[in-house]
Image (tube, helix red, strand yellow):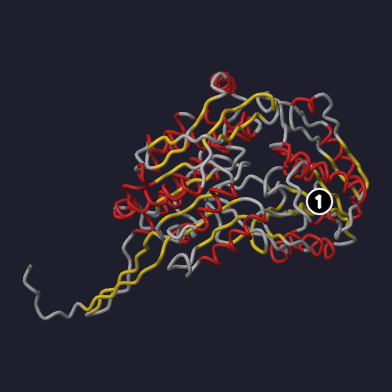
């Protein structure tokens, strides 16, 4: 533990290095892991409540998105009664966990990070199969999960450092107490990293946790549960409850002993959780439930008239179509100054057309299938809307791939109006709207003219224009002359505002403060002797 300011953004922390697949050994390790995990497909994972496996008659099935006749595996499906069992077990275990010194809790999270390093390529391979993450995306997700464990372990120790403002005759201490029991409701697009991050933050600060993974990615969550138990997280402190959101998720949100809900997902679900938690606060429970919710974005990149178009094209293509556009940080609008509009659009189309499309397990793949049938149908509906609202500048045909998986090729729509649905609504797929702006004033107005404020960026050679972007772009994460995805823990704390989210930034120095209750303790030290021991 260091003596640095506990709220400093410059705490000593090193991110887990991303995998360099130019190195043959890494390629071989990843391919071998895909082969090993492929042989394990079809597994079954029960619930884990108080360290015990609990099976159910109902099952959730996880399928391979790019080959939907293959099943990743099945899990038991929790309901409200299982949620109550897990919460009651967490109530019994949380006091002992909270009383542990922060260093001992943090050591278990560091051990979890080490276990993830040990199983690095296997965890990545499970993500390839379950979420159709191409190699670089899958391995980066595991790196981020490791980072969250290490970063929040260190942060919890900083919060626990004794502090206070003493004066003669008076001693003051400022401490942080865990909130109690956290329900972690996680998404499928970063199935290990985000689930691990929210869970690690709650555990590091002394809370008990009930994990409810996304219905589309419960198997990788089961792997996290296994590693957490191996790392020494007490059985009653962490529970694994895959199930339908309207059943087990709703039960956790409403439970009278759940103090905090950490959620990442859609705007509609996030706002519903926030509203329901407020309704039951003070009625079913004698406290106000805390809600942390990250709810998406409609992110824009501005291309200035003096931008390096080659750099801009590369940044936009990766930000818009990496992992099939299924990132809340993805670029779904590019706003181009009219002077360079035609030149930029031409290069953008050709660069996007060249993206390799195929099964995520193939090393060259950049664009694979979207997560499921519902997602594909939604994206296809927006493509039809785009054909009415703009000019279909590129529509990549996935051909026979559409017969085997949930594929949607990259689509680019030009000449889209700022108020069009394609420019206002989150699509969460490989669909990009290209808009024209007369000048930078109009570009900023268009960029800010949506309900969200998550990520955004600008490509410009003008220091004055970059300064304007710093001041005027309404986003939580602003990127200058680079892509707008790929935030790193500790380096680029991630999160937005407006309707993009509630709470502070994940991977930032103040994120853990949401999981604790501050308490001030003041003692009069001008005593007249001591009472005898009882």
- Decide which of 66, 133 is in the foreground and name it: 66
Q: Position of residue 86 (x, y in %)?
A: 42, 47
Q: In the image, is 213 to the left or to the right of 532?
A: right
Above or below, comparing residue 227 to residue 431 in the picture: above
Taking the view exactly as shown, the residue that stands out farthest to the front is 57
User: Is any part of residue 460 visible from this angle?
Assistant: no
Residue 300 image-quadrant placement: bottom right
Left or right of residue 121, residue 468 in this image? right
Above or below 110: residue 156: below
Image coordinates of residue 496 in percent, x first then y, are 63, 59
User: Residue 344 at x, y = what percent?
Assistant: 87, 45
Pointer 1 local density, CA inside 10 Å: few below 14, some 14–19, many at least 20: many
Residue 347 appears left or right of 246: right
At mark 1, the secondary structure is: strand
Q: Measured along the vertical axis of the image, is residue 209 above or below residue 377?
A: below
Q: Is residue 481 visible?
A: yes
In percent of width and height, residue 94 lies at 34, 53
Query: Can you identify the residue that label 1 sits on?
Result: 334
């Amino acid at each position: 533990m260091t003596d640095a300011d506990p709220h400093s953004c410059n705490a000593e922390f090193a991110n887990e290095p991303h995998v360099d697949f130019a190195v043959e050994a890494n390629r071989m390790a990843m391919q071998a892991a895909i082969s090993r995990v492929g042989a394990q497909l079809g597994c079954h994972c029960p619930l884990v409540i108080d360290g015990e496996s609990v099976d159910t008659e109902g099952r959730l099935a996880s399928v391979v998105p790019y080959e939907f006749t293959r099943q990743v595996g099945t899990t038991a499906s929790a309901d409200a009664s299982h949620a109550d069992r897990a919460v009651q077990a967490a109530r019994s275990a949380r006091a002992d966990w909270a009383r542990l010194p922060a260093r001992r809790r943090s050591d278990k999270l560091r051990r979890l990070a080490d276990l993830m390093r040990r199983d690095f390529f296997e965890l990545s391979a499970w993500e390839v199969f379950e979420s159709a993450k191409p190699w670089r995306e899958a391995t980066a997700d595991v790196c981020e999960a490791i980072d969250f464990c290490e970063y929040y372990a260190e942060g919890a120790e900083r919060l626990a450092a004794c502090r206070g403002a003493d004066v003669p005759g008076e001693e003051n201490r400022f401490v942080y107490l865990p909130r109690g029991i956290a329900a972690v409701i996680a998404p499928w697009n970063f199935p290990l990293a985000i689930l691990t991050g929210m869970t690690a933050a709650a555990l590091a600060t002394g809370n008990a946790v009930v994990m409810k993974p996304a219905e589309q990615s419960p198997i990788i969550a089961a792997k996290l549960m296994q590693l957490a138990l191996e790392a020494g997280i007490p059985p009653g402190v962490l529970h694994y409850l895959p199930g339908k959101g309207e059943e087990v998720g709703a039960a956790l949100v409403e439970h009278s002993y759940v103090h905090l809900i950490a959620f990442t997902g859609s705007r509609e679900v996030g706002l519903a959780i926030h509203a329901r938690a407020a309704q039951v606060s003070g009625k079913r429970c004698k406290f106000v439930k805390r809600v942390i919710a990250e709810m998406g974005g409609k992110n824009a990149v501005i291309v200035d008239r003096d931008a390096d178009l080659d750099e801009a094209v590369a940044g936009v293509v990766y930000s818009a179509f990496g992992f099939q556009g299924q990132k809340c940080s993805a670029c779904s609008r590019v706003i181009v100054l009219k002077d360079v509009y035609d030149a930029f659009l031409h290069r953008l189309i050709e660069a996007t057309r060249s993206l390799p499309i195929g099964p995520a397990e193939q090393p060259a793949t950049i664009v694979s299938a979207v997560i499921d049938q519902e997602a594909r149908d939604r994206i296809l509906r927006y493509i039809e809307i785009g054909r009415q609202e703009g000019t279909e500048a590129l529509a990549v045909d996935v051909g026979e791939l559409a017969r085997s998986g949930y594929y949607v090729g990259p689509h680019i729509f030009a000449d889209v109006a700022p108020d069009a649905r394609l420019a206002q609504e989150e699509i969460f797929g490989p669909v990009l709207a290209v808009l024209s702006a007369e000048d930078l004033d109009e570009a900023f107005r268009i960029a800010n003219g949506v309900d969200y404020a998550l990520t955004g960026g600008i490509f410009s050679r003008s220091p004055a224009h970059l300064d304007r972007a710093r001041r005027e772009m309404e986003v939580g994460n602003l990127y200058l002359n680079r892509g707008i995805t790929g935030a790193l823990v500790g380096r680029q704390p991630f999160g937005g505002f407006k309707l993009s989210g509630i709470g502070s930034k994940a991977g930032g120095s103040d994120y853990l403060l949401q999981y604790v209750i501050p308490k001030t303790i003041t003692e009069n030290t001008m005593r007249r002797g001591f009472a005898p021991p009882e």
